[in-house]
């Protein structure tokens, strides 16, 4: 059985993943793909480097790495901003190890448009946390990535988003709803921050949501036959399952 066929089979064999899945939806005339998961039934985690220490950088290399471990990605998305060498800009935790520290200060670009935030993945749960709250609480995260800006904070849009902005990009982000379900979204066409944040607030019902990136935004979702290519990525967030043999 080929890798891609095995991935599709996984979606039918694992009830938690099959019940979640990815769907296309339209909000205010704009189309998005949304992939939703219950973290209690799905192994969500971060990836940056392979077993040799090289940056993974692509969905194809992630597939190959996991296949060598008897696993497969059933979903993946670029998972946060990175420097030219593809090292994470802010906090990055993988398998319980803090590989880069939290950045709490304001700065240039989208990452520094405070408040920014952190996606925290632990056993059976996920949170999107504004960075200063994260530093106050220091929750236990097995995997984490910092990005910015926050899209939604306590049910309100980021205060610096403008309804009449003309800055449009294909964008992707993540939010967690009141039931603890994680929703990853990517736009089909360029959208503004305000438009994208309204998707999380008004449709996905996530009181906390985080922007992951724009321009390079990509999705891997075998159940809908999607595997985006493009420039090499830095951090990758993925849902992983054991591959059928």
Image (cartoon, rainbow, N blue to C red):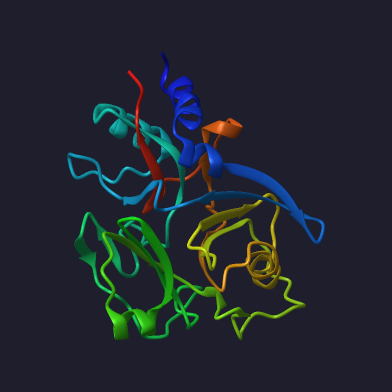
Percent across and percent down for residue 16 are 47, 42
Residue 229 visible somewhere in the drawing? no
Percent across and percent down for residue 234 are 37, 53
Percent across and percent down for residue 104 are 35, 83
Residue 216, placed above or below residue 28: above
In the orientation shown, which residue stands out farthest toward the right?
Answer: 29
Residue at left offset 60%, top offset 33%: 224
Question: Left or right: where does residue 192 sit relative to residue 158?
Answer: right
User: In which quadrant of the rendered image does the C terminus lie?
Assistant: top left
Tell me which corner region of the image, top left, top right, bottom left or bottom right, holds residue 155.
bottom right
Residue at left offset 42%, top offset 82%: 107
Residue 60, placed above or below residue 87: above
Question: Left or right: where does residue 9 sit relative to residue 105?
Answer: right
Residue at left offset 57%, top offset 56%: 215
User: In which quadrant of the rendered image does the N terminus lie?
Assistant: top left
Residue 126 visible somewhere in the drawing? yes
């Amino acid at each position: 059985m080929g890798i891609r066929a095995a991935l599709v089979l996984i979606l039918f064999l694992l009830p938690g993943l099959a019940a979640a899945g990815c769907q296309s939806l339209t909000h205010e005339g704009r189309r998005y793909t949304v992939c939703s998961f219950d973290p209690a039934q799905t192994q969500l985690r971060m990836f940056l480097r392979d077993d040799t220490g090289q940056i993974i950088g692509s969905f194809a290399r992630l597939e190959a790495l996991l296949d060598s471990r008897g696993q497969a990605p059933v979903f993946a998305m670029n998972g946060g901003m990175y420097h030219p060498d593809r090292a994470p800009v802010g906090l990055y935790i993988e398998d319980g190890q803090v590989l880069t520290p939290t950045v709490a200060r304001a700065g240039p670009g989208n990452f520094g448009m405070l408040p920014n935030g952190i996606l925290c993945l632990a056993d059976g749960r996920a949170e999107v946390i504004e960075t200063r709250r994260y530093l106050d609480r220091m929750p236990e995260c097995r995997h984490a990535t910092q990005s910015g800006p926050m899209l939604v904070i306590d049910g309100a849009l980021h205060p610096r988003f403008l309804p009449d902005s003309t800055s449009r990009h294909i964008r992707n982000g993540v939010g967690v709803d009141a039931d603890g379900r994680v929703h990853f979204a990517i736009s089909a066409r360029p959208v503004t921050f305000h438009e994208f944040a309204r998707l999380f607030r008004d449709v996905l019902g996530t009181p906390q949501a985080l922007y992951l990136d724009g321009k390079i935004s990509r999705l891997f979702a075998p159940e809908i036959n999607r595997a985006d290519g493009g420039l090499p990525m830095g951090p990758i967030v993925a849902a992983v399952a054991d591959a059928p043999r």
